[in-house]
Image (cartoon, rainbow, N blue to C red):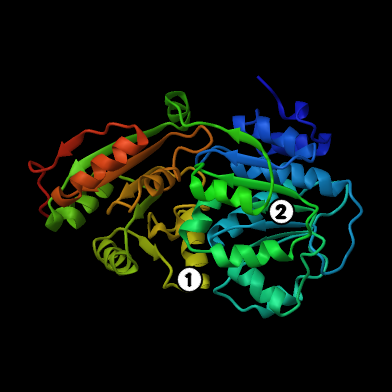
Amino acid sequence: MTSFDRLGLSKNLVNQTQALGYEHPFPIQEQAIPAILSGKDVMGIAQTGSGKTASFILPILEKLQKAPLVRNRAIDVLILVPTRELAIQIQGVCTEFNKDLQQEVRTMAVYGGISINPQMKGMLGVNVLIATPGRLLDLLDHKALSIEEVQLFVVDEADKMFQMGFDEEMDRIIALLPKKRQNLLFSATLNDKVAEMKSRLVIDPVIVEIERTEDQEGHLQIEESAYAVDPTQKGPFLRYLIKSKEMKRVLVFVSSSRTADNLCEKLNKNGIKAAAIHGKKSQGARNSSLKDFKANEIDVLIATDLISRGIHIDDLDVVINYELPRSPLDYIHRIGRTGRANAVGKAISLITEEEEHHFKIIQKKNKTRIALEETRDINLQGY
C-alpha cells in the first residue's frame, strides 16, 4: 500500500499527515498529488468523504513552502468554492497541515454574511485565498487584492457551483486571472456542466476519477435504512428514534429553514438539545451552533442543504433525512457527512407515502436498494 512519502511531499508534510492520523493516502490523493506537483492541470472526480480536500491542499503547501513569498495583495493560489461552510472547512484543513513548513504560508477564507472590512484589512500577505464567488468579486471591486498573478487556480465542488447559479460570476473571475496558470477542478460528479467548465478554462487536464463502486461504498461504511412514516407522525417518530436508540451527534436534514426552526423548537421542548442551521441564520449564529454541536453541547443539529457539502464533523454517528433532498446527488452529499475516513456511520430516511416515488428514483440513480421498514405498530405515545 502506498504511503505519503512516495507521493513527492517533503518530510515535514509527511510527518504532519502521520501526526494527524493519516496512515495511507486515499485513492484520490495517491493519483492527484503527484500530478499536481508536476504542474499539470487536474480534474478530480471523487465522492464526498474521499479525502478530496487534502489531495489539493498538500501539494499547494508543498509548492508554496519552497517558493519565494512576497508580502503584498497579490494572491498566489485562489481556491473558489460555492459556500461559506466549504470555505471554512478548507481553511481548517489548511491550518491542520500548515505546521512545521519550511516557511509560513498564509491562508485566508473569505465569504459573505459578515462584514467585508476585516477581510479587506487582513488581505495583505495572504498566499492562499479560499473564497466564495460573490465575496471575491466584492473584494476585487474594493481593490483589496489582485488575482492577476495567481499561479494556481482551484475550483472545488464545481458541479455545485453551477447548481447554485454562479455562471456569470465564474466568467468574470476567470477573465481576471492570468492566462498562464495551473488549474485544478474537483467535483463529486462529472456532468455536462463540469465538462463545460473545462472548456471555459481552455484546459486539457489529467482526469483522476475515483468511481463509486460497491467496494468504495463498503469503504465509506454507511448503513442506510428507511422508515415508512405517516406525515403526522414524523416528528414523534424522529423523537422516538433519538430517545429510544439513545442517539448522540445526530445531523437532521430538512428542506426549508421554517421546518428546521419548527423541528428544533419541538425537539428542545421534548428534552432533546438541538439547534438549527440554515441560510436565514446569521453567520455568527451558524458558527456558534456548529461549534456547540462539535463540542457535544447539543445532540442534534438540524440543517438545510446549505451545509450538505463542505462540513466535516469528526465522529458523526447518524444522518437523518427528515425530508428528502431534491436530487439523488444531494442525497449522497447529505449522507456523506457520516462514515468518513473509515468511520462507521448510519443514514436514516423518514419516508411518507407521497415521498416513496422520489425515494425510488434516488435509489435507482445511486444504484442502491433500501428496504422500507414499517412503523405502524410502534407506540409513539409520549413522544
Q: Position of residue 206 (x, y in %)?
A: 67, 36
Residue 245 shows up from this direction: no
Image quarter where the N terminus lies is top right
C-alpha separation, residue under disc 2 versus residue under disc 1? 31 Å
Q: Which kind of residue does numbered mark 1 sit on?
A: Ala
Q: Position of residue 214 (x, y in %)?
A: 42, 25
Characterize the local packing of mark 1: few (<14), some (14-19) or many (20 or more) Cα atoms within 10 angstroms: some
- Residue under the point 27% across and 63% down: 263
Residue sitting farthest toward the left: 377
Query: Which quadrant of the figure has residue 305?
Result: bottom left
Image quarter where the C terminus lies is bottom left
Q: Position of residue 210 (x, y in %)?
A: 55, 32
From the image, tell me which residue sits under label 1: 285
- Residue under the point 49% across and 63% down: 165
Helix, strand or loop status at disc 2: strand
Question: Viewed as shown, does residue 152 lie left or right of 51?
Answer: right
Helix, strand or loop status at disc 1: helix
Question: Viewed as shown, does residue 159 lie left or right of 370?
Answer: right
- Residue under the point 57% across and 72% down: 112
From the image, tell me which residue sits under label 2: 153
Q: Are marks 2 and 1 in contact (CB under 8 Å)?
A: no
Residue 173 shows up from this direction: yes
Q: How many marks?
A: 2
Q: In this view of the protein, which residue sits in the foreground, 181 or 88?
A: 181
Q: Which kind of residue does numbered mark 2 sit on?
A: Phe
- Residue under the point 35% across and 49% down: 327
